Image (tube, rainbow, N blue to C red):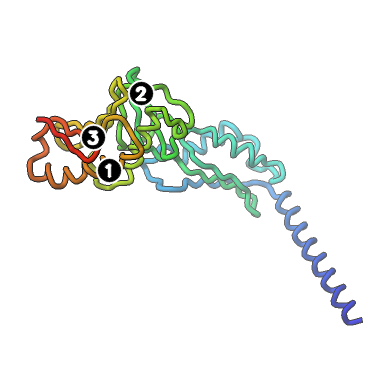
Amino acid sequence: MKKVLINITVVLGAALMVWVLASAVNRTMSTKSEMIKYKLLGEVSSHSLIHEDDLRVIMDRNFNDLLIGAYVSDVDVKAIEQRFMEEPYLEKVDVYLDAKGILHIEVTPREAMFRVMMKNGKSYFIDRNGVAFPLSRHYTPRVPVVTGHIPVYQAQLVEKDSSILSDVYELVSHISKDKFLKAQIEELYVNPDGLIEMIPKVGNHRIIYGKHSSGDMADRLENLKIFYRDGLSSEGWNKYSSINIEYKGQVVCSK
């Protein structure tokens, strides 16, 4: 008898919990959405490529009459999320409603890794994932510039091993992770043969990197760092007109 009573108590307790949860869900779904909160994630500052005001404009233009005062059950969170993902400056979007009926829009802006300036005058950024996006009216970040004979951007350039943009992406990605090189290199130039030259921030010389190769990229750049530290630091930054690092284990200089 005692065991039966325990089983009945457990069943009633479980049923009560289900009823409480269902009631809470029903109350939430019948709550009206009275507020929208925006949040920019990541390294956000006044120099961001997109601002909170831009997010408000997107909402006003697309969902202004459908949200404030609407029941939570009628808010199409997925549609809002998809609309924000169409914005070229956003890498990630998360839209959700809380128990109080507050609509949260949390976004992660794209982070420019380098800027491409094409011969036809057009310009765009490439982010850390290899995705292209346009210049911003708010701010132009100081990132390496890539000029010269650049082909038209194609999506998923990171996966296109034969693309010069893929080569440049891998090279700049390595440079951006090296504090010393990042402080030295400000521009990359691609000549008609697809060979890469680098232009430093200090000095009048050019660095001949040559044809890109993933296999010896790190060694070539390490040779450059050693030469900068042990050679140019004592001989002067303007002694040479070019520094060639395309040959394995060598740094060849020309005056």
Quick one: 135 or 229, which is closer to the camera? 229
Marks 1 and 2, Cα distance to the nearest angstrom? 25 Å
Mark 3 lies on residue: 247
- 31 versus 184 height, above or below: below
Quadrant in the picture for the N terminus:
bottom right
Q: Nearer the viewer, mark 1 or mark 2?
A: 1
Disc 3 element: loop
Mark count? 3
Q: Position of residue 190 (x, y in %)?
A: 30, 26
Locate residue 216: give its quadrant. Answer: top left
Which numbered disc covers residue 219? Answer: 1
Mark 2 lies on residue: 150
Crowdedness of circle 1 by 10 Å Cα count: few (<14), some, many (20+)?
some
Tag 2: amino acid: Ile
Residue at image point 33% right, 46% down: 177
Which badge, 2 or 3, comes first in the chain's sequence?
2
Marks 2 and 3, Cα distance to the nearest angstrom? 24 Å
Crowdedness of circle 3 by 10 Å Cα count: few (<14), some, many (20+)?
few
Q: Nearer the viewer, mark 2 or mark 3?
A: 3
